[in-house]
Amino acid sequence: MPRKGMRSLCFHSKSPSFAAYSSSPSRPSSVSFPTPRRVPVTNFTDAMIEDIIGNAAVLVMKWNPETSTYAKVTSLFYESKTEAQQFIRCVTELQKAMHFLVLEDPTSEKIVHAQSLMEIAMKRLQKEFYQILSMNRAHLDPESVSTRSRSSVTSTRSSTSDYEDGGATTDDDVRFARESISEVEHVSSVAMADLKSIAECMISSGYAKECVHIYKIIRKSIIDEGMYKLGVERLSSSQIHKMDREVLDLRIRSWLNAVKMSISTLFNGERILCDHVFASSASIRESCFTHISREAATLLFGFPQVLVAKSKKSSSSLDVFRLLDMYTSISERWPEIDSIFSFESTAAVRSQALNSLIKLSESVRSMLSDFESTIQKDSSKSVAHGGGVHDLTLRVMNYLSLLTDYSNVLVEIVSDWPPPAKSSLPESYFDGPHSEDGQAPVISLRMAWLLLVLLCKLDDKAKHYKDVSLSYLFLANNLQYMISNVRTSNLQYLLGEDWISKHERKVRQFAENYEGLAWGKVFASLPENPTAEISTVEARLIFRNFNFSFEEAHRKQRTSVVLDQKLREEMQVSIAKKLVSAYREFYDAHRLTVGGGRNVELYVRFAPEDVENHLSDLFFGTMDSDGSSQYSPSHRRSPLRL
């Protein structure tokens, strides 16, 4: 999303007025604010005390919004960075002086005066803190903040303003920093530095509660608004199960985008900002970030758990891929989630994310079991035309090919899932891919088992062909399709070359069985020695037998289908090698002996070239002689390469 994207998503509305935050809220019992930092006591002289209180009085009263219209409508930190730094320094010196007076002269009227100035200064800083947060919503959006790592925030901040060592930052310094970083980053860095300076001053002066109260309310509104714009809202399980499939799919896609944006930008940027502003107090850092993000993050990561809770809703095979997308979305971002929500008080967020992963895993395993059961229970007696690829094979292989695109997360999901019993798998399945401990990975065994279940079901379906030769062609076609899908998907890495090689041998065996049954009579119609001298009667009988058996075989087999081009060409060539050369020799040796002139045509119906052309038309699925529709993809006949 472009840089403007997240800002327009989360930060267009105006913040409530400062008056809504300026009252002192009751301090939550669950949050412990740190004791004000003890300032090293310096031996002050009366003159020094007078100077400190006097200087503070001038600057503090100048910016007192209760007595100055100018101070009421103007921002100190926006007006002059130098004067803002002087203000912070005056407050720090005033605090030191107050500590000295409390120890040396607790009854001094100067303490009362200094305390009065301190309260006015804190109200001023409280107002400044609110103004910086609210006026810089666009520049303090999580996207701008998250473009830098947490460590780089400190280095960038030091280039724009150095509040920690007391060094003054002039307007020239700011202009110089502007040249080194982009405008957005510059404004964001300056605002973050100002917030940190104010927060440290207020915390050390004992006014942490007021500072934190403003920060929590403004920043939580930003997170909540961002989540709303990302489409994250609280839904019950019953609401989800009543949704149409299209609506639910849109919800899931919206959630996937929300996870991506919220982890990389929204929560990450907020954690960076919170860590920076409250760098001086670990407890306040944790308290603020937890209050701001926990509710929204728990709601976000709770969606998958609500989605799959008690879900027995009928669904298509594509549902599992949405669940795998959701699992992947959380799993791949787990290191970021664990880092962002590393506080003890945000353990509920991490727990919710893990619980959703567990529920998603259980649902995926359940769907895989249901998928296996669906294959086993398929009782359809329909057969593929011409011994082609069955719809069940198409569906199963498409499903498994897509499924293995999620191999990385599937390994996690099925890692503790008991593999199929070894007795239920052929021994050869355990000679495939191995892990380092010599055992086949669970996911590999699962895929091999599902393919075996499919093969067994196809073997049952092959029995429905009346022509046994088509049964073998059907098995060859379907197994070849399976192998092709294995080779062009991640299945090849799960099953290994050994599985592919073994099943390619099975395809060749099925093809040979088909060839023997479909064309065996034609092969047998020719003598073993085609050029041996025989009588005219014998030659005529052989030609007649060949004509009849060839025509019958071609008529039966011309609608047969072999979809795989390589397999089709191999089968055409194999039949041609056994038939054309033998027939050509017999034809050349005995064509003229069976009769002359028209009599030859009574016995010799096919020239060798005719036989070759007829064979080259096989396995494309042609039209019947009556014009009825059969599977006939367009093809270009090419000469057989014998």
Image: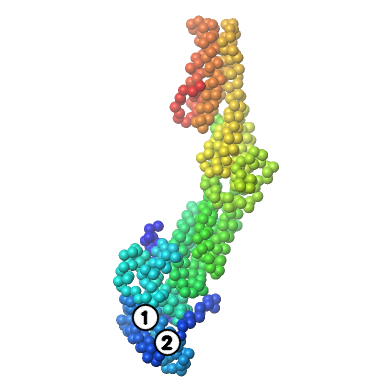
Name which residue lies at 56% across and 31% down: 387
Whole-angstrom CA distance, mark 1 to mark 2, is 15 Å
Which quadrant of the figure has residue 97? Answer: bottom left
Number of numbered labels in the structure image: 2
Sooner in the amino-acid sequence: mark 1 or mark 2:
1
Q: Is residue 291 visible?
A: no
Q: Return the x and y of residue 625 as percentages of the image width and height.
A: 50, 23
Above or below residue 45? Residue 152 is above
Q: Give the label, 1 or 2, closer to the camera.
A: 2
Q: Quadrant of the N terminus?
A: bottom left
Tell me the SS state at disc 2.
Answer: helix
Q: Return the x and y of residue 556 as percentages of the image width and height.
A: 56, 24
Q: Amino acid at mark 2?
A: Ala
Residue 393 relative to residue 50: left or right? right
Name which residue lies at 58% across and 9% down: 532
Q: Residues within 10 Å of mark 1 (few under 14, many from 20)?
A: many
For residue 87, which numbered disc appears in the image?
Answer: 1
Q: Which residue is mark 2?
A: 97
Say which of 147 and 562 sits in front: 147
Name which residue lies at 33% across and 78% down: 83
Q: Return the x and y of residue 537 as percentages of the image width and height.
A: 59, 7
Q: Return the x and y of residue 201 as percentages of the image width and height.
A: 43, 78
Q: Residues within 10 Å of mark 2 (few under 14, many from 20)?
A: many
